[in-house]
Image: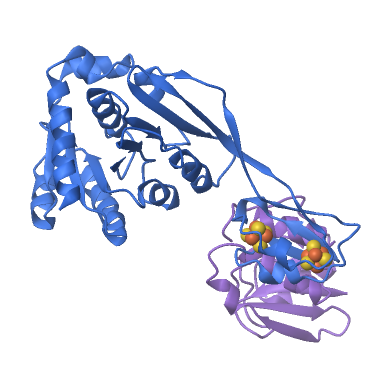
Chain colours: A blue, B purple
């Protein structure tokens, strides 16, 4: 069972939901923090982490001595990451998608493996919860391969909870595709609704069942609930604004630490997801 | 000398298009004879990324030594720079006027990109 916890924008409480659910389920659950640009689940779970493993990706490095300037590499590159000018190959790393096509097509052996570092992956455990997260190298733009690497860590008791990056672009898709269920976290405000709609569109394109958690559910308006009803998206949990919860968050504590009665609600949330994902 | 000018049309009397990678046409003008060759850049206009790189490669292949345009993004600049093409940015008016102003001088060449990506 793979559950991706996502939200159309940051700051909706996505990490809160993912970490509390993981912690409430405990034993053998694996939490994967795939918000690799700003991983913060560890701040709430305080895992003991092992050594950071570097994740690299292919990027062409051109051997100017061997290169004849034939342009075959630039012609095959769908992403226009290569240009040949004045007989020399220019590489645009931020456009490269590491497909390896250029290396394949070069008859001179002039395309070498430049091995760019995307970021690091760290794993460990937080009590009963198995934990892994990725951290994108500062200045790196290509997060999907790193997210895929984090997702490949799948040793668990059968339940994986993914803290997806906010938004609706490629990194989010990398963090939700192949999941059994996507849990969208939103706030009941017009902004929340706007971003939720975009998120739901993305999830629908992938054909994954989804449900909703409404955070700070007693502020704002009914727009989100009306939208959910219209689109047939079940509202699985509402978390009202609670000063104690907000304070806990600000010092990196879980809801279930300061309000133990919430542990049951998060387990219940999981049970409902399991039922929805199976049917 | 051959000068590349980004343009909205295929005539010397057409306006300079400020965008480099996404200008619909690029005119390669021979400054001695004022004869020119209009490159259709429309394939590039809708490119998601890398339009500037592509346009830069094209004008380099056409033998341009100078580029007159409005804005030049970082990737495009890197490419024209590698091709040894000098860039004059913030150019306005018609292609003819732009070339005349360039020939009359004084010319200030750009030392870097003057736009974010996606131009
Ligand atoms: S295919 Fe190889 S030889 Fe040809 S331009 Fe590219 S790197 Fe150079
Ligand atoms: S690896 Fe693929 S995307 Fe990257 S430069 Fe080579 S052909 Fe282009």
- A237 left or right of B110 in image: left
Taking depth in this image into account, of A193 and A76 the one nearest to the observer is A76
Q: Residue at x 15, y 48 (%)?
A: A276
Taking depth in this image into account, of A34 and A24 the one nearest to the observer is A24
Task: Indicate the quadrant where residue A18 lies.
Answer: top left
Q: Position of residue A237 (x, y in %)?
A: 13, 35
Residue A153 visible in the shown view: yes
Q: Residue at x 56, y 59 (%)?
A: B118
Residue A6 visible in the shown view: no
Q: How many marks?
A: 0
- A217 left or right of A205 in image: left
* Quadrant in which ligand 1 is drawn: bottom right
Quadrant where the image shows the C terminus of chain B: bottom right
Task: Indicate the quadrant where residue B110 lies.
Answer: bottom right
In the rendered view, tell whether residue A4 sits above or below residue A199. Answer: above
In the rendered view, tell whether residue B98 sits above or below residue A64. Answer: below
Quadrant where the image shows the N terminus of chain B: bottom right
Q: Residue at x 77, y 66 (%)?
A: A106
Q: Position of residue A214 (x, y in %)?
A: 16, 37
- A174 left or right of A68 in image: left
- B38 left or right of A9 in image: right
Q: Position of residue A123 (x, y in %)?
A: 47, 27
Q: Residue furthest right?
A: A65
In the rendered view, tell whether residue B62 sits above or below residue A184. Answer: below
Taking depth in this image into account, of B62 and A187 the one nearest to the observer is A187
Taking depth in this image into account, of B65 and A135 the one nearest to the observer is A135
Q: Position of residue B68 (x, y in %)?
A: 73, 67
């Amino acid at each position: 069972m793979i559950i991706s916890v996502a939200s159309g924008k940051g700051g909706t409480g996505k990490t809160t939901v993912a970490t509390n659910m993981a912690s409430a389920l405990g034993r053998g659950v694996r939490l994967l923090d795939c918000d690799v640009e700003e991983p913060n689940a560890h701040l709430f779970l305080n895992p003991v982490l092992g050594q950071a493993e570097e994740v690299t990706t292919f990027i062409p490095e051109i051997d100017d001595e061997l290169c004849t300037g034939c342009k075959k590499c630039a012609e095959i590159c769908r992403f226009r990451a290569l240009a040949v000018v004045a007989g020399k190959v220019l590489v645009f790393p931020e456009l490269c998608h590491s497909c390896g096509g250029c290396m394949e097509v070069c008859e001179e052996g002039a395309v070498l493996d430049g091995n760019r570092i995307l970021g690091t992956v760290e794993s460990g455990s937080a009590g009963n919860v198995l934990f892994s997260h990725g951290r994108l190298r500062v200045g790196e733009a290509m997060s999907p391969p790193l997210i895929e690497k984090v997702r490949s860590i799948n040793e668990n008791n059968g339940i994986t909870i993914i803290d997806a990056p906010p938004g609706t672009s490629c990194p989010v898709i990398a963090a939700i595709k192949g999941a059994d269920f996507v849990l969208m976290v939103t706030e009941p405000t017009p902004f929340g609704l706007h971003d939720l709609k975009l998120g739901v569109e993305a999830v629908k394109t992938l054909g994954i069942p989804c449900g909703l958690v409404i955070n700070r559910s007693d502020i704002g308006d009914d727009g989100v609930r009306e939208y959910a009803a219209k689109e047939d998206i079940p509202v699985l949990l509402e978390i009202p604004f609670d000063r104690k919860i907000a304070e806990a968050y600000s010092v990196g504590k879980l809801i279930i630490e300061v309000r133990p009665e919430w542990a049951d609600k998060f387990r219940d949330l999981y049970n409902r997801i399991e039922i929805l994902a199976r049917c | 000398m051959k000068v590349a000018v980004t343009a909205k049309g295929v005539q010397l009397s057409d306006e300079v298009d400020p965008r480099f990678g996404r200008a619909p046409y690029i005119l390669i003008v021979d400054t001695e004879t004022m004869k020119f060759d209009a490159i259709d850049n429309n394939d590039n206009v809708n490119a998601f990324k890398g339009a500037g790189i592509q346009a830069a490669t094209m004008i380099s292949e056409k033998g341009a030594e100078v580029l007159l345009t409005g804005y030049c993004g970082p990737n495009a600049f890197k490419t024209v720079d590698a091709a040894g093409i000098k860039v004059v940015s913030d150019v306005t008016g018609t292609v003819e006027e732009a070339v005349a102003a360039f020939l009359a001088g004084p010319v200030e060449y750009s030392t870097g990109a003057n736009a974010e990506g996606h131009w």
